[in-house]
């Protein structure tokens, strides 16, 4: 097998490691590309391509994460990961871990960890690397990696997200939610929301934003209905999709351009958190990005007195 073939075989795994460490599709793709350049330039043939490439992409991601910390601290409003529509790496034996670890809630928890803790947690808990492999990847002793894993697990367990265990029930509830959303049915929305539901948006100061956070079933249902009903009226589309392993949707204008990605956290038969990513800088990998400000102005003009 040639180096190119070995790399392409492992590319899905490398991207999935990098995305969980960085929370950014574009940065993960850049890290994978840099990994290839280092692999291609290596004068010796590694004994294990998987070990070499996984270690390389982990080190690159740690460096990127360290520099990204400052940018995220200066970010305007809440910061969310770039939405991921499909995880390229699949492992039937670890499907639950893979799905949970890519959710918006889990990725936001990972932001609390140091870069080294994050790398160790992702490699160990998500991808089941041995501590020997992890020690090589992060250039620390096995004992140090075990300690980092304990610390990371403690931080994650304190706020670990829980989701509806029955996937079919979760998808059925999400389907009812999006039907009510498209119709602007306030009562239909309200009955699906937890009493203390949170609606949180990431616009990065570059997209329309009502507020950084809206709390409560009554408030959230009314805000959603008032926004989405006129949006659909002018030809906007709410496209139900799995986003970051959870029920979600992509909002598109009448020309099919992307305006927003939305995810739902569902537990105990109710929607607990709704997260929206509106920052156009985070949507380009989903498709051509539309002008959310222009769509909002048109939707406002299309409002009826009862809206």
Image (cartoon, rainbow, N blue to C red):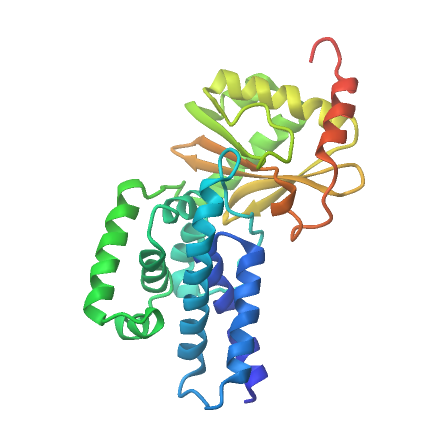
Q: Name the residue: 64% across, 33% down.
A: 207
Q: With 128 as the anchor, is 14 left or right in this view?
A: right
Q: Quadrant of the C terminus?
A: top right
Q: Is residue 183 above or below residue 286?
A: above
Q: How many marks?
A: 0
Q: Would you identify the image quadrant in which residue 216 lies?
A: top left
Residue in the image at 47% along x and 20% along y = 217
Residue 101 x, y percent position in the rendering: 41, 52
Q: Residue at x 43, y 62 (%)?
A: 63
Expressed as whole percent of the image width and height from the top left, the position of residue 33 reads 57, 70
191 relative to 306 in the view: left or right: left
Relative to 209, does residue 97 appear above or below in the rendering?
below
- Residue 102 at x, y = what percent? 45, 52
Please state if 298 lies on the left or on the right of 104 as rendered: right
The picture quadrant where one finds residue 182 is top right
User: x and y percent of residue 259 in the render?
Assistant: 68, 38
Vertical position of residue 291 compared to residue 15: above or below: above
């Amino acid at each position: 097998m040639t180096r190119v073939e070995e790399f392409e075989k492992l590319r899905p795994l490398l991207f999935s490691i990098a995305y969980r460490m960085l929370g950014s599709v574009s940065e993960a793709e850049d890290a994978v590309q840099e990994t290839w350049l280092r692999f291609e330039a290596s004068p010796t043939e590694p004994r294990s391509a998987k070990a070499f490439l996984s270690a390389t992409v982990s080190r690159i991601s740690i460096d990127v994460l360290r520099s990204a910390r400052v940018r995220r601290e200066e970010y305007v409003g809440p910061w969310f990961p770039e939405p991921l529509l499909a995880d390229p790496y699949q492992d039937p034996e670890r499907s639950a871990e893979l799905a949970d670890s890519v959710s918006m809630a889990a990725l936001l928890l990972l932001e609390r960890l140091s870069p080294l803790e994050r790398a160790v947690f992702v490699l160990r808990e998500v991808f089941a690397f041995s501590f020997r492999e992890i020690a090589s990847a992060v250039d620390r002793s096995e004992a140090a990696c075990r300690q980092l894993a304990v610390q990371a697990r403690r931080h994650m367990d304190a706020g670990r997200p829980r989701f509806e265990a029955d996937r079919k029930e979760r998808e059925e509830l999400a389907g009812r939610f999006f039907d009510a959303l498209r119709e602007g049915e306030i009562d239909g929305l309200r009955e699906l929301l937890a009493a203390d539901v949170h609606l949180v948006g990431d616009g990065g100061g570059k997209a329309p934003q009502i507020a950084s956070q809206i709390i409560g079933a009554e408030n959230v249902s009314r805000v959603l209905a008032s926004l989405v009903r006129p949006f659909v009226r002018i030809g906007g589309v709410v496209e139900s999709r799995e986003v970051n392993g959870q029920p979600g949707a992509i909002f598109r204008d009448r020309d099919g351009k992307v305006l927003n990605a939305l995810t739902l956290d569902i537990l105990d038969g109710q929607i607990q958190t709704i997260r929206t990513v509106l920052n156009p800088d985070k949507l380009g990998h989903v498709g051509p990005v539309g002008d959310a400000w222009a769509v909002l102005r048109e939707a406002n003009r299309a409002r009826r007195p009862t809206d």
